Image (cartoon, rainbow, N blue to C red):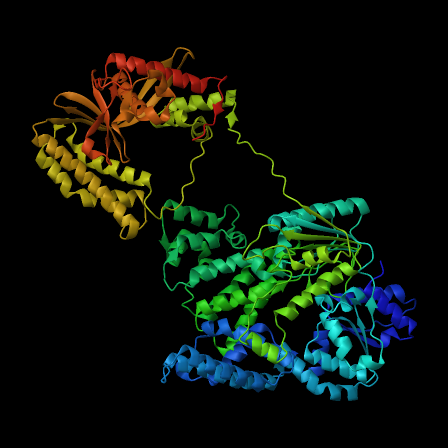
Amino acid sequence: MRTFIDDVIVNLLETDHDISQLTFVLPSKRAGTFLKEAISRHVNKTIFSPEILSIEEFVETLSDFQYATNAELLFEFYDVYLKHTPKQNIESFDQFSKWAQLLLQDFNEIDRYLIPPNHVFDYLSAIKEIEHKHWSLDEQPTQYIKNYLLFWNRLKIYYAQFQKQLKHKKKAYQGLVYREAVNNIEQYIALHTNKTFVFVGFNALNKAEEIIIQELLQQEMALIYWDIDKTFINDPIHDAGLFTRYHKQNWKYFNKHNFNWVGESYTEKKDIHVIGAPKNISQVKYVGELLERIYNEKGHLQNTAVVLGDETLLLPLLNSIPKSITTINVTMGLPLKVIPLASLFEALFGLHKSLSEALYYKNVIDILSNQFVTPLFQTETANVAEHIINQIQLNNKVLLTVEDLSDIAPNHKALLHLLFDSWNDNPKTAISCCIKLIAKIKINLDQDKSNNLLALEYLYRFHQVFNSLDTLNSSFSHIKAIVTLFSLYRELIKSETLDFKGEPLKGLQIMGMLESRVLDFETVIITSVNEGILPAGKSYNSFIPFDVKIENELPTYKEKDAVYTYHFYRLLQRAKTAYILYNTEPDVLNGGEKSRFITQLEVDKTHDIKQYLISAQVPTIEQQLQHIQKTSDIIEKLDKVAQKGFSPSSLTNYIRNPIDFYYDKVLGIKQYEDVEESVAYNTLGTVIHNTLEDFYKPFENQVLTIEAIKTMKSKISSTVHHHFKAEFKEGDITSGKNLIIFEIAQRYILNFLNLEIEDIRQGNEIKIIAIETENKVPLYLENLSKTVMLTGKVDRVDAYNGTIRIIDYKTGRVESSKVEIVDWEAISTDYDKYSKSFQILMYAFMMQKSSKISLPVEAGIISFKNLSSGLLKFATKPSSNSRTKAHSITEETLNAFEIELKKLITEIYNLDIDFIEKEV
């Protein structure tokens, strides 16, 4: 295809210009590569490459100043602020940086448009004085109002002194560079009379650029080529031609010279598709499909560009490009904030911005499990970082010290101190630690350099960031706290990018809207064409009010929208096919309805627009419950489990969900245990069980007395504390929720002991027979011709007025209906109704088989959340509505239970019955 750059080179050759002697000035560096390629195609002899500059580089040359980075400008400006602000009004660097960046943008605009600064600042001060009269009738303004008005009066002092300080160092922000370039233009022209400049593809020019270019044109030292279509320049209200119409009408140069050029490409036949897609990810996924389709049709993606209206979609887009497309060039940089390494420093700052000596375990685990840190702990046999994490979880440590970590891994003491030693709110220490850590990671990655090239590139860029922070802080010492450093670090990684390396002239081109300047493509795909994105609309980030901008001819959102209108239509100008995608789901934060650009295309009727909505194909996914078929290996594993013994809890676990039984008993997969910040429910249960065991074990085969129980009451606090220490390890129970749970445990036990005392006072005799009795009994299964073991620990067996009772403690709430049986067959299938009955019957069955009790007996549950109900006794009922209950467990009861128990274990072994997951 014939591009705008091709037309420029051909015209220069036709007008007998020596290309190698020209200096080309372009809107961006990017276009320079395409310009060189066009020269190589059109020039048929060997020549030296001409000088090619971006407009910013050219202006920098004129000014004799260097561009300062954003961070440098902020530090320099704070230096000026400290010198020219009364001490009582000085803000910290952190607070200052929040508004200073906005003010620097305003300084930049004032200088780029060559506005007399005092005119703007005096005007602003006057406005604020008038506003004060409106919002305060008090003749004596408060100190806040005085400070507010004084701030506006000081703006011109800040501006003047800031410029003076920068000029002294020969550094400048963009606007100051432009102002100085205008001041130097005459001198520059006098010294470079033999040069010819070619300005290519400009549109919106600030006042400084206008003066510089016009001066060179008037001196016959320059040529200028505009890229505008007659459709836009001839339409008095079309924003795509706003700036070029102005330049054509107002530049004196064009009174005597031709305006090169007004093209007629836009009206040529084009295939334009407008596609609505729900949300951003749908857009990039569809772009991936489009690219695959285009690639399959053409066999290449030469002259194809994807232009991202929202540049944050770069990573999702790269992940959506089909693997068959291998030649890609990404013009945009990847912001450092989205690079994996950023998460490491985010975690480090998150840990160290707290002044506490104690380290929160989650922060420690975040750092130790980071992909760049974990390899530093690798030894020949194991990874020490994993060992430290396991020890933290095993010992339930919520808060740690560096010494704790060093004790776990003494051989990695130096590395642990580097990572976790307090930064003492000292930014210099923080920067030094980060730079040392980068060096350690680099040494590790260098061991396998060829496979870690990208990671090393990440490290290099972050090393530059911290070096920059170190240099600036050493020069100015404005950063006084870690929080301030963190804030500045975040600002830096937002603006800094990791540039991609690629073949700029081959294959698919991916770019932002501004990178598309001067470039033409046959096929263009533009994403996020929504209001609030393309164009950005009425966003207003400035101290200078709208009316003051109009008064001083400074650009407003109107001009900014016109810039993007031009870029949008220029992309379509020479394209043969265009796909314009927008988000159909309005979002307050990420742009609203489809862009006015799309509506404009629909209304002007120049092209037949094909419009359609797309939606992702979402297959209906039916939840498939897992089926695990039993094999001989599984049966072999079950035999091993059976030798150890089936417990009541494991069998009720099978009733609840067979797949959980399979994972736990057959595969041996245990639930992942994390650090308990708050005491878990099972830990509370264990503490209560163990405390009662300590209290009652010494009284086996004895009748309880009130004095004995009163002695137990005096030991509640110390015994509960001892068992919390054993179970909760080094977890803290001295404050917060854990202290409440500790008190609850004591209260539960106290209430239970009081209940026992009350029972004895009423004349009842309680004799302790056994506490925490271990049972292991064989059970022969006739259907399988094999014997399995049953195992389980009974919390308490006592004789209550001569009646043997088997008691199970539950810390949760249990109702009496949960220990009553109506339908014997359901006991091995209905977990919710009968799991509690199953457990206590199994305890009674095992104790009877091992001759530890004589029938009949009673059995039941003591629920600590339902203590007022006393012992919830097991009962059989003829029907669910019957009030008749039989509490006695007899031979007949256990025979009925044995039938169901054998049926259940036989089912577990049955090869024809899979382990089938239940919806729990």
The image quarter containing residue 160 is bottom right
In-image side of 273 versus 495 (left or right)? right
Residue drawn 46% across and 55% down?
Answer: 412
Q: Position of residue 677 (x, y in %)?
A: 35, 48
Which residue occupies the foreground of this view, 441 or 2?
2
Which residue occupies the foreground of this view, 795 or 810?
810
Residue drawn 39% across and 49% down?
Answer: 392
Q: Position of residue 884 (x, y in %)?
A: 22, 17
Q: Where is 640 relative to 106, above or below?
A: above
Quadrant of the frame with the C terminus = top left
In-image side of 312 versus 18 (left or right)? left
Residue 776 in view (yes/no)? yes
Q: Position of residue 109 (x, y in %)?
A: 61, 77
Residue 36 in view (yes/no)? no
Q: Where is 640 relative to 307, above or below?
A: above
The total of numbered circles placed on residues is 0
The image quarter containing residue 512 is bottom right
Which residue occupies the foreground of this view, 354 or 434?
354
Q: Position of residue 765 (x, y in %)?
A: 10, 26
Quadrant of the frame with the N terminus = bottom right
The image quarter containing residue 191 is bottom right
Q: Where is 524 relative to 246, above or below?
A: above
